[in-house]
Amino acid sequence: MSPAPDREALVAAAREAMGRAYAPYSGFKVGAALAFADGTVATGANVENASYGLSLCAETVAAAKAMDAGARGGLVAVAVIGGKSGAPEAVVTPCGRCRQVLSELAQLGGTDPLVWSAGGAEVLETRLSVLLPHAFGPGSLG
Ligand code: THU
C-alpha cells in the first residue's frame, strides 16, 4: 500500500533542500523533492558552475539522485520552491529541460506526477502531463 504524498511535507522537503543550493552566480536558490509510490523521497538543489551554462537545476539533481539510488518509476509527486537569496516569492515551475528529465522517470513507471510549485504562501498544483504534453520518452524510440 503506497502512502499518498503529503503536499505540505513534500514542499517542506523541497524548502530544506533549497538551503543546500550552490547558486553563487544567479543568487537564485531552488530546491526540489520527488515523492515515490514506495514512500521514499529524493531531494535536490541547484548546483551552478563558473561556466554558467553547465549549471544543474534542482529537479535534475533530484532525479539523478533518485535514479542513482535505483528508482525506475513510481514518481507520484514533485515539489519545487525557489527564489532570490532563498526567499521564495513567485512560484517556480520546472524548466523545460527538467520537465523532460522528470518525464523519463515518470514514463518508466507509467505515472503522471502531481507538480507542486511553491512560492511564498501560494502553491500552484498541476501535473507533469500538463507542463509537458505529448512528451517524447522511452516508448518513442520503438
Ligand atoms: N533553476 C532550477 O534549479 N530549477 C528550475 O526549474 C528553474 C531554474 C535554477 C537554475 C539556475 O541555477 C537558477 O535557478 C537560475 O536560473
Image (spheres, helix red, strand yellow):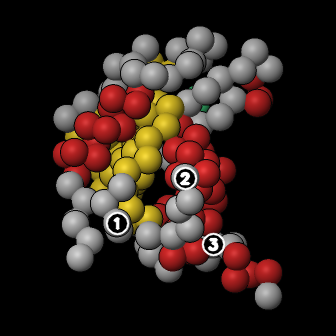
Q: Residues within 10 Å of mark 1 (few under 14, many from 20)?
A: few
- State the mark number for residue 38: 1
Which residue in the protein does label 2 denote? Answer: 69
Q: Residues within 10 Å of mark 2 (few under 14, many from 20)?
A: few
> Would you identify the image quadrant in which residue 136 lies?
bottom right
- The disc, 2 or 3, on the residue closer to the chain's N-terminal end is 2
Kind of residue indicated by mark 2: Ala
Kind of residue indicated by mark 1: Asp
- State the mark number for residue 135: 3
- The disc, 1 or 3, on the residue closer to the chain's N-terminal end is 1
What SS does tag 2 mark?
A: loop
Instruction: Name the one closer to the observer, 20 or 54.
Output: 20
Q: Are marks 2 and 3 in contact (CB under 8 Å)?
A: no
For ligand 1, tell me if the residue under mark 3 lies within 8 Å. no
Relative image position of residue 92 (x, y in whole percent):
43, 39
Q: Is residue 117 above or below residue 85?
A: below
> Would you identify the image quadrant in which residue 60 lies?
top right
Relative image position of residue 133 (x, y in whole percent):
56, 72
For ligand 1, tell me if the residue under mark 2 lies within 8 Å. no
Q: Is residue 140 above or below residue 66?
A: below
Q: CA distance from mark 1 to mark 3?
A: 25 Å
Q: Residue at x 50, y 32 (%)?
A: 45
Image quarter where the C terminus lies is bottom right
Q: Quadrant of ligand 1?
A: top right
Kind of residue indicated by mark 3: Ala
